[in-house]
Image (spheres, rainbow, N blue to C red):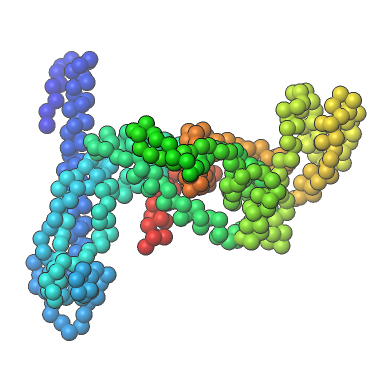
Amino acid sequence: MSLPFTQGKLQGKERKNALQSVQEQAKAAARAAIRPVLQGFLETEVCAKLGREKGEARHISSQPREIDWQCGHCGCQDANQFTRDGHYRRGLSTGWEHLSDLRVPMLECQQCQHDVVTQFTILEKYKRFWMDLDQDVLFGSGFCESLRHLQERWSATIEGSVGLRTLNEWINQIEALASRVHTEPITDVPPVIQLDGIWVTIQSQHEKIKPDKPHRQRKKRSGKKIVVLVALGFWANGSREVLDWQIARSEDHQEWELLVQRLWERGCRPEQGLQLVVRDGSGGLGEALALQWMEQAAAIYKATTGSSARTLLVQWGKQWREQAPQSVATLERDFEQTLVFYALSGLTLEWIRTTSLLERTNRELRHKFCQVVTFGSHKGAEVAVYLQVQRLHARWSGESWWDTSHALYFELRNLHA
């Protein structure tokens, strides 16, 4: 290990060559280190399963020592009948580099002399990539990194190709965790729930066949607008959480009813602590009014009491009724319902008198939707929302998205175990 250092400061091409040399040597060191670490854990697991160290004689006993590995031919699970049978070599792509000759232990059943089917904890059969790729894909997707960016980065890391379909299929496995969110009981019911919708585009498939650029026959696809209905909960201690969401065709009451009914079934009820539901009912009001009008209207909801808000509404209505009668009528309609939050105690009014905090949450979701442009399926949209919700929850609770995204990988594996 040597570098072309001199008495003077390295600059230009010499400095570049020195840095590249360090990178290559560090990469070689990492590659040399990861192989014995993985192989060491594989050998350790074999010793634990067999109950004996390498080179130790096999125990002959009438009492079987059953393990979760079994012979692929006779189905025997007695570790006393298994012996080591050398190794086979396989490739494995990791976050350090691609390992082309990882030595994996093999076992033989002494009852029938056939191979034992092994399920190693740190290694999955027929899987080309190690778990750090799966974890990194979740981390990057949660930070709105596109599939093509993930593909390019990992292709450079392993010095080989990584397919977009491989990445997409792995991300979509998270739908199993997303589905669980929609059904889990809500035991800590928030006193306030805000509801709002965000529009996105999703692709739909038609029966008509159309050739693509490589002249393959594919069903014609087109984009259509859908809406993600979001429910955000607030607690008196300042915490917040996306309780649920619904991918719907519109914001009609029938679509909202599905989400509201599910929240009800999961436990969000008045007798469990729910005090207020806030929704954005202004429609196009904000676009129709001037900034000065909006400032004066906003002052109504900044009043310290309900009676003060009513007084300000009367004054504001007198000023604007002639110029904007429909807008005034819109604000006056159901005005008493909008003042319910004044009757609540222990809650910060800034959280509940508008849906601004929910709109900030939706802005985070839009960032992902803008990056994707068009989702290829309902599953893809569901997974994207779930990952963004988990990232927001990590931020709001002061946790690291790195740790949270890595934990999702293990949650998914436990779900499939």
Give coordinates of residue 326: x percent, y percent. 84, 31
Give coordinates of residue 126: x percent, y percent. 25, 54
Can residue 174 be seen here? yes
Residue found at the very far bottom of the displayed protein: 62
Residue 106, relative to residue 150: is it above or below? below
Nearer to the camera, 353 or 64: 64
- Quadrant in which the C terminus is drawn: bottom left
**Residue at left offset 36%, top offset 43%:** 165
Nearer to the camera, 332 or 46: 332
**Residue at left offset 34%, top offset 33%:** 214
Position of 79 with respect to 270 (left or right) is: left
**Residue at left offset 14%, top offset 69%:** 114
Residue 88, relative to residue 319: is it above or below? below
Nearer to the camera, 341 or 64: 64
Q: Quadrant of residue 356?
A: top right
- Quadrant in which the N terminus is drawn: top left
Can residue 348 be seen here? no
Give coordinates of residue 162: x percent, y percent. 29, 40
**Residue at left offset 15%, top offset 48%:** 101
Nearer to the camera, 403 or 177: 177
Q: Quadrant of residue 299?
A: top right
Position of 201 with respect to 275 (left or right) is: left
